[in-house]
Amino acid sequence: MTHLSSEKILARLIAFDTTSTTSNLELIDFVRNYLDGYSITSQLVLNDDQTCANLYATIGPHDIGGVMLSGHTDVVPTVGQNWNSDPYQLKADDQLFYGRGSCDMKGFIACTLAGVPEMVKQSLQTPVHLAFSYDEEIGCVGVKKLITAMEGFEVKPRIGLIGEPTDMKMITGHKGKAAFRVEFSGSSCHSAYITNGVNAVEYAAELVSFIRNMNQAVQKRNMLDQGYSVPHSTFHVGSINGGTALNIVPRQCQIEFEIRNLPLDDVDALAHEIKHFAMDTLLPDMQSRFGECDIQFTPISDYPGFQTDPSSKVIEYTRSINPIDEIGDPVSFGTEAGLFDQQLGINSVVCGPGSIDQAHKPNEYVSRQQMQSCDQLIENLVHRCTKSYPFD
């Protein structure tokens, strides 16, 4: 089989439109066929309607834990963005590779796959596990099915490298996230007689104001971590929709909000404060005017915060293979690292090519230099995995 460079594989991966909530099966089929070419068996874990899949494979010994290289295959939409080139065709110049997903995070997957031939060629004493997921961008949705499957594995990876864009710095912490939809049901009437109705938009606005004020409340409680650029848990209302016409008191209103919590903050307790205000203050007032009023909270997505000890095994190991020997500041964006760490006990670090500053934007890019550094990390990993098993 012809060995492909990371650049050529990146071009193939970018060509697959794997926008979140759409199918990633064409990309997964490409990866699976690529691995088949090196006699590597892979396992798929599909979603309920079998339109998306996680992929898991092991190279080397199957009876001991090893190093997991993990990345998500989905990307954010390009709709409404002004690109200078086709976002699904790799555009390259002397310094940069442009394309949707180039840094977030198909660049890491490309470097991983480019290293497969050498992994197969060498006699690995430590296995390398590949874990590629779907629908990470909408709240780490797909990887949860993979983790459920991995819970039944007799052998699990010992450490995990989550290849999100970090400029190849080793990131040891990030915030968690919990997102909710809240639906207000009031009572409509003619706006000339507002006392005959219950305005769902106005009650929703009271909750929006309460959520906004939570940002100040957590700071007063000294719930701070100065390692983060935003050193406290944050609360954000991203959408609101309600009402039909100006002269009708609106019966329905819906908001969506998120909490991005520091790893040591109890996100359930923070969410409970918001629910408590809605259900114990707003709802009784609504129902005192019209008994059938209601407020419904629906979880949208969630993933835990992540924090690993800088002196942990995964950092020691990654330092030994990473050409960029630097630990970066904790980040506010989320990854799958916390799920692997908390649910499977896989000691993880976030480290990959590209910068989050380019992610999700038009003309997204990853630099050649960053891809070369990641190629070097994979090469060093393969060399390290030929040595004696390091996790006894």
Image (cartoon, grey):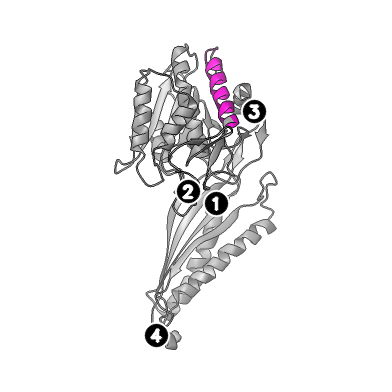
Does 380 appear in magenta? yes
Q: Amino acid at mark 3?
A: Ile
Report the mark closest to the observer, 3 or 1. 3
Eyeballing the image, is 115 above or below 207? above
User: What residue appears at the point 67 percent right and 31 percent down from the top-left corner?
Assistant: 326
SS at badge 2? strand
Q: Which label was assigned to residue 324? A: 3
Location of mark 1 (residue): 267
Report the mark closest to the observer, 3 or 4. 3
- How many residues crowd around disc 1 within 10 Å: few (fewer than 14), some, or many (20 or more)? many
Q: Position of residue 189 (x, y in %)?
A: 38, 83
User: What residue appears at the point 56 percent right and 51 percent down from the top-left corner?
Assistant: 260
N-terminal of the pair, mark 3 or mark 1, is 1
Q: Amino acid at mark 4?
A: His
Eyeballing the image, is 109 above or below 332? above
Label 2, label 1: how far apart the Cα atoms are: 10 Å
Give the extent of the magenta segment. Answer: 369-388
Q: Amino acid at mark 2?
A: Asp
Report the mark closest to the observer, 3 or 2. 3
